Every structure is written in structure tokens, then in C-alpha cells.
Image (cartoon, helix red, strand yellow):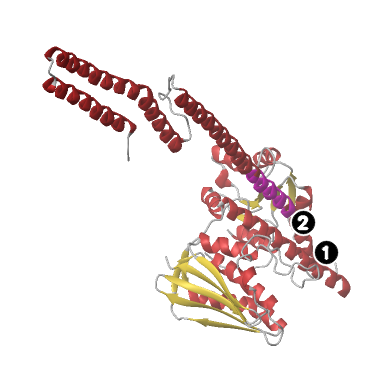
Amino acid sequence: MLSIKYTLFSVSGVSSFIIFYMGVVNFLTSADESTGMILLIFSIFVAIGTLLATVHISKIITEPIEKLAKSMSEFSKTNKRAKGYEIKTNVSEIFQLNEDFTSMEEKVEKTITVQNEYVEKLKDMDRKKIEFSSMVSHELKTPLVPILGYIQMLQKENFLGDLNDKQIDAVNEIYISTLKLQRLIGDILTTQKLDLGKLDFNKENTNVSDLLLSILKEFKPIALEKNIILEMDYDENIHILTDKDRINQVFSNLIKNAIDFVSAKTGIVTIGAKDQDDHVEFFVSDNGQGISADKQSEIFKKFYQIDTSTSRKRSGSGLGLAICKGIVEGLGGKIRVESEENVKTTFFFNIPKN
Amino acid sequence: MKKTQKEESKKMKILIVDDNEQITKMLTTFLELKGHQCTIANDGNEGLSQIKENIYDVILLDLAMPEFDGYSVIKNLEDSNTLKDHKIIVFTASTITQDELENLVKRGVTAYLLKPIDIDLLHSKLVEIADL
């Protein structure tokens, strides 16, 4: 890298030397001694003058440029104009450079301030949104208390008086819908807790095959009702320190999806676990309609529905997979999907053993 | 601990502290049909004065109430060293964590129930308390 200061000094140094040398040569070769002497003294003055001029030029040009350069490098690090780099100059080009730089700095500072204000506003809106939906879902939950209480009482034989068969059917239908509503509100609350990082995990030593068996038992009646096969495939003797209720929640969401996507009679849903060194790979696979490649990255997003048509057969909240992802990641694992349309879909989730 | 198969609990005097009238009405309907005697307090303050003036076998306490909430009731009883003299079942709509609920039990609350309240579960908790 070339420096103005050293270039200036070397050029003036060399030229002063040449002038001085010419003076000496003149003095030695001159016939007239006094003329030679005058020329020698003159050349000495010129050489000194050149050097002094160089020092002066260096002071008025290179010093402010150096200062400006330092100020710029400080600014690029901190985005704030540092103090102690004020420049005084009579050189118009440098003056202009300094003015332009100052106005650029002011603009950058202003832009950053405005941006930060926007970021703060957005953060605040996000907080308010979460608080609001938390309040709403809490308010939705409260009326469920008497609704479910009275349904339970009506379902008890002879508790609030006898019901006829049609009334019993009606109460049962109300009960099913109320449970769906309760589940939906629960999903929204779980999602909010995940957003706020407030979902708590209670890890305990868990036998994987026991866990899978209990899940299988829970979903066997639903599989039987839809006339599909629900089976297991797992390595024996896997133990894992994790939150088994949350793992159960992930499996429940995935199995419900799988059962919805397979056809009655030909449908097969397989759940299982593979032992992989320091983690366990759980999976749920089905031979249903599959998920196209372009949708595979979308399905873990909140409120995503694969089928958005109003005539769609499924009626989920669109929160199930987002909750699965949140739980799996909260337990230190990862979830992914592999799918071939109309052939097979498998959701894998790895959970660390400790 | 002795295990019991008994379905019906003995008749108890129960105080219900909840600001929601539909909830207190539903609980009263259920509990009175089960043969218990219910008193209602619509906020924490009223609940606390009832607790201090009368003797109840069980207190059903909602944690989330405006102003004087369930926590304040518990804190107040703790301060007068009488929390453990009462059998308190708290209700919550899951805005607090499992750890916080367990902590309340450690402090001397008898049990907790998550909203929506399963009335069969409430009944079995009452049976447990009656047998203590």
C-alpha cells in the first residue's frame, strides 16, 4: 500500500538532493569561484525550501486525510461518529470530502435509529399479540368448565333425572364437539407457551417399548373403527431420559394425521423406534396420499393446512405439526419428513437419550 | 396408606371461592346432589373472611380471580400460620406450570385440579380427603 506522506517525502527528498548535487557540481566545475559559491548557497536554500514545503503540504493534506480515514474506520465499527476526529482544513477538496462524509454518517445514524424503532415496535406488537391470544384462549376455556360439568352430570345415570335415548344421543354429540373445542383451545395455548419458551418438560427414565405399547393401546380402537392396520416396529431394550408425556403428544398428533390420510381397509400405519447410539429415532409412517415435495417444508409452519379447500375432509387446527416441531426441538431433537406421493410418508424425530 | 374402594364420601361442608357464577352454580349443583353442603364466595376477600369465621371440611379455590386472587388467599393463610389447618383444592386454567402447582402442594395446599374441571376427579379427591 502506498502512503501519500512517504511518497511526498521521498519525491521531495530526491529532488532536494538533486538540486543540492547540481549546486555542488556547479561549484566544483565553475571557473568563477564566487559565482559557484552563490549557486551552491542558492541550491542549499532551494533544497531546504523544498523540504519545508513538503512538511507543510504533508501537514495540510495528509494529516486531515489520515484523521478522516481513522474516523471512517471507527464509524464502520460502531455506527456512531467518534469524538476527537474533528477536521479543520482550508483545502477545498478535503473540506468537501469531510462534509460529504459527515452528511453520510448522519444519514446512516438516522436510518439505524429509525430501523431500531421499527424493530422495537414489532417486538412490542408481537408481545401484545401473544398476550392477547393468551387472554382470549383463557377466556374461551372458562365457559368450558360449566359446559363440561353439566354434560358429565347429564351423562350420569339418574343424576339429574332420567334422559330418553334421543336426549342421551344429543348429550353425547354435544360432548364430542365440546372435547374438540377443548382440544383446539389446548393446542393454541401450547403453541403460545412454545412461542414464549414457557413449555415445561419433566424428564424421567423411560422404557421406549412400554411407551410405544401404551400409545398403540390408545389408538387401536380408532384404527379398528376405520378398519386400518396399526402396527409397531422397534428395537428392544431402549431406555431414554425424556418427557414421555410430550413424546406421547408428538406421537398422538402424527398418528392422528396418518390415520386421516390413509384409506380405509388398505391403510397401514406403523409406529416405532430405532436405537441410534446417543439418541433414539422415533417414527410414524403411513401408506396414504403423501405430501408433495413443495409442501414438505411448509407443513411444520403454524396454521398450515395441506388441503385448504372448504370441502376438505380433515378438520385440524393446523397447529399439530408446529407443536410436534416445538416439542421435539424443546427436547433437544429434530423432526423431518420423507414422502413419496401415493406411496409412503414417514415422519422421523430424533430425541437424545440424555 | 389404606386404599379405599368406597364410592360415596361422607357429607362435607364445602366453601367454593370463584368469581365465575356459572362455575360456582355448576359445582354447587353437583356437590349438593352428592349430599354436601356448599357456601359460595365470589372473590378472594370474601373467601378469606368465610375461612376465618367458619369451619369447612374442604375449600375449593380458583387461583385466577381479579384483584384478591387465590394466591393472595394462600399467602394470607400462610402468614397467619393456618394454611395447613385447611384442606384446599385449587383450580387453574393451565396458565401456570406444573412446577408451580407442585410448589403450592409443598407449601401446604392439599390438591390441584386443571380447568376444565373433571367432576368425577373432583369427587374422587373429596373421597380421598374424607378418608384422610
Rendered image: mark on residue A160 = 1
- Residue at the image position 64 percent from the left and 46 percent from the top: A126
Span shown in magenta: A126-141
Marks 1/2 same chain: yes
Front in this rendered view, residue A57 or A141:
A57
Rendered image: mark on residue A248 = none
- Taking A149 as reference, is A226 above or below it? below
- Taking A312 as reference, is B103 above or below it? above
* The C terminus of chain A: image quadrant: bottom left
Residue A142, image x and y in percent? 73, 52
* The N terminus of chain A: image quadrant: top left
Front in this rendered view, residue B70 or A329:
A329
- Residue at the image position 52 percent from the left and 50 percent from the top: B103
Chain on which label 1 sits: A
Q: Is residue A148 left or right of residue A198?
A: right
Reply yes or no: does residue A54 show up in magenta: no
Is there CB contact under 8 Å for labels 1 and 2?
no
Farthest bottom residue in view? A266
- Residue at the image position 12 percent from the left and 23 percent from the top: A29
Chain on which label 2 sits: A
Q: Can residue B10 be seen from the camera position used here?
A: no
- Taking A106 as reference, is A248 above or below it? below
Rendered image: mark on residue A146 = 2
Is disc 2 placed on a helix, strand or loop? helix
Q: Quadrant of residue A320?
A: bottom right
